[in-house]
Image (tube, grey):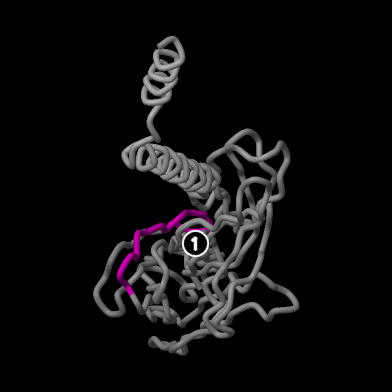
Amino acid sequence: MRRVLIGLLVTVVAGCSAPAAPASSSLSLGSASHASAVQSSSSAVAAAAAAQRTATITSIRTTDATKGVITVVGTLSPAPAKSTRVPLHQWIPSQKRWQEIAHGYSSGSRVTITTVQPGSVRTYRIAIGPQAPYAAAISPMISFKHYVWRGMFKKGLVRAGGAGQPSFTVVPPKEGPRRAEADLMANQGGYVWGEVDTTGCRYSRNWLGNLTDGLVRVSLHNPTTALTSLRMAQETEGWLNYDINGVTRLRLQVTDIRSGYGPYVSIDSLLLCTN
């Protein structure tokens, strides 16, 4: 009897042992692994996104129109290592390529670049090379009109004329390399004029020296409509300046009002242009 009871207890104990893990347990373990993989993938994407660097031109302007200085200010985010070299590129249409024309060095997230360029209408961008963990970055392009002062006669006279043996003589390049100086003369009672192409220009600045033995009028025309004028007494100096934005042909004229020998005026004339 005792042996029978012991056998029954063994059978009961064996029947109460832990059952095998259900299928749901296997699914639960699989879901955890999948969630971990998704989380790792998301972290990798987030890390990749965080490693993006942006470059932007925040300001571009002409800071010295006489020398032709352009100043470009840019931002880099996140800020690169101190004094990182940042090139300024200019698009060269004739060659269909970008060309580095200057560079600056970063200070925090900011960079300032200056360069001397002739008058132009060009497209610019800044760039920064790869710097772990960031890839290289290039700013969006920006078009800019760069106005620079140049001699009125840099591109020569288009036409000249007048009445009373008019003479419009531009000082030769060896004597006047700026191509800004000229002498205007005519006989008593006469007048003299000269025209230049002012496409791409927006301002005219003219110094005048009246060497006439009397009174003259100096004027600017578009090309035959008077824009502005100045009466000048004998042996005086003066300025004749005017906004010529939109004017493609500019005529400068000297007319005798009252003199003994005829008008004689020396000029030093500049144009503010993108060419």
| Rendered view: 51 above or below 142 | above
| Rendered view: 121 above or below 85 | below
122 vs 19, left or right, is right
| Rendered view: 185 above or below 144 | below
| Rendered view: 60 above or below 123 | above
Extreme residue toward the left, this view: 225
Amino acid at dot 1:
His
Q: Which element type, helix, strand or loop, lies under badge 1? A: strand
Extreme residue toward the top, this view: 2
> Which residue is drawn at the image coordinates 38% and 31% (left, top)?
19
Query: As rendered, which of 32 and 246 lies closer to the eye?
Result: 32
In the image, residue 256 lies at what x, y percent?
39, 72
Query: As rendered, which of 271 and 206 lies closer to the eye?
Result: 271
Q: Quadrant of residue 169?
A: bottom right
Which residue is tagged 1? 146
Stretch in magenta = 233-247
In the image, residue 64 lies at what x, y percent?
58, 50
> Which residue is drawn at the image coordinates 45% and 88% (left, top)?
158
In the image, residue 207 lies at what x, y percent?
52, 59
Quarter of the figure that contains the N terminus = top left
> Which residue is drawn at the image coordinates 46% and 55% (left, top)?
239
Query: As rendered, which of 5 and 124 lies closer to the eye?
Result: 5
> Which residue is drawn at the image coordinates 55% and 50% (left, top)?
72
Q: Is residue 207 visible?
A: yes
